[in-house]
Amino acid sequence: MHDQKRSEVCSKISMKTTYWLPKTVQFQNHWINILDIDTGLEFILEDIRQLVCPDYRIEALVAKLPLNLRRKRHLFPRNGEPCQENVDTLCWLALKYVFNLFGYEQHREFIRWIRKEVIPKLLTPTYTGESSQVFLGQEPPNHQMEISSQTKNTLSYPVKVGSQLNNELIATKLKSVHWFNTINNHQLLLLSKYKKEFSLIGAPPTLIPVFLTTELSQCYLDLLYKQVKIPAFSETDNLLNHLLRRRYLDFCQLCLENEKISYSDLYQTFITNEPNLFAAQELDIALIFYYLKNSLSFPIVKVLSGGVFLQAIDMCSQQGFLDEKLTSSLSIAYFNWLSTLLMEIIAVA
């Protein structure tokens, strides 16, 4: 009977409609359905409502969301249930908007759970071979995942001496000042209007710039994913470069609450030791949000010009690992993107 009903409903729907298979996971006794959309994870709004504000009506919650943060998806039928049309979902920015709106105190635990438990499970061979996008006539696989947050997620670091321990502490501190943890709803709305300027990737999402020219984009991606050799850190005799690094280091020490770190520590932590340079970019963005949150008066743009990501580009150029003209254009484009993020997306009142 259930199969017949499902067939009758599906036969009335256009074959061009895209359906998505939810993956069901458990967070603190709450079942959360997640969609692995091409543009990133999305969360079923009703599930998040039950977690964050169970006494709030779903219609009232949807009305609270800005128009450009609202999403609707079609869900493929499971377990004999009929197709679900126009289900409200939350993208990353909308999820954070709801967390902020209701002052959800465990938002960091939720994101840590997604990053440490859900994402690795999604990437296992059991799930990588199964598409989240389904067309009519297909039978969906079982997407209920045995993931629970009942066990407390804690980060443990082995005790090491010297610079290595310092680097681990730096990386740990950066997670606490990640822009997704500190952004307010006014900034979220401004950020959501500049979709052509950036992309979101990862959990919590990382902001990455969008470059228009193919050659420049390829150079950026090669650098970002370390497809080219990136030199180890070396001191510079150039006075201007030395001053830029010193200014950047001073602000990092303030933001990361660690006066003992050196510029070489920063470079080793975010450039040398990482499999990619996402964290190096996140450090720049963390400084921007820290600057705005604390209403500091000095020019942050000058500070950012000494960042480790830009230094990595510069050293690749100096040692001939990347074309000099291309790296010069990339440095300018990246710096302009940071300036746009600061001045237009975040700082606009």
Image (cartoon, helix red, strand yellow):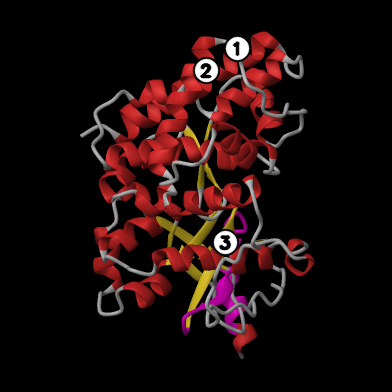
Tell me the residue that label 1 is attached to. Answer: 237
Answer with mark 1 or mark 3, whichever residue precedes in sequence. 3
**Above or below — where is 237 with respect to 66?**
above
Q: Where residue 152 sits in the image (x, y, percent)?
A: 52, 77
At 39% from the left edge and 72% from the top edge, which residue is drawn?
46
Can you say which quadrant of the picture contains the C terminus?
top left
Q: CA distance from mark 2 to mark 1?
A: 7 Å
Answer with mark 2 or mark 3, whichever residue precedes in sequence. 3
Q: Which residues are magenta?
A: 5-29
Q: Where residue 116 sits in the image (x, y, percent)?
A: 60, 65
Seen as rendered, the residue at the extreme left is: 349
Quarter of the figure with residue 274: top right
Is 83 covered by the magenta stretch? no
At 45% from the left edge and 68% from the top edge, which residue is drawn?
109
Q: Dots 2 and 1: beta carbons under 8 Å? A: yes
Tell me the residue that label 2 is attached to. Answer: 242
Q: CA distance from mark 2 to mark 3?
A: 37 Å
Nearer-the-camera pick, 260 or 329: 260
Tell me the residue that label 3 is attached to. Answer: 115
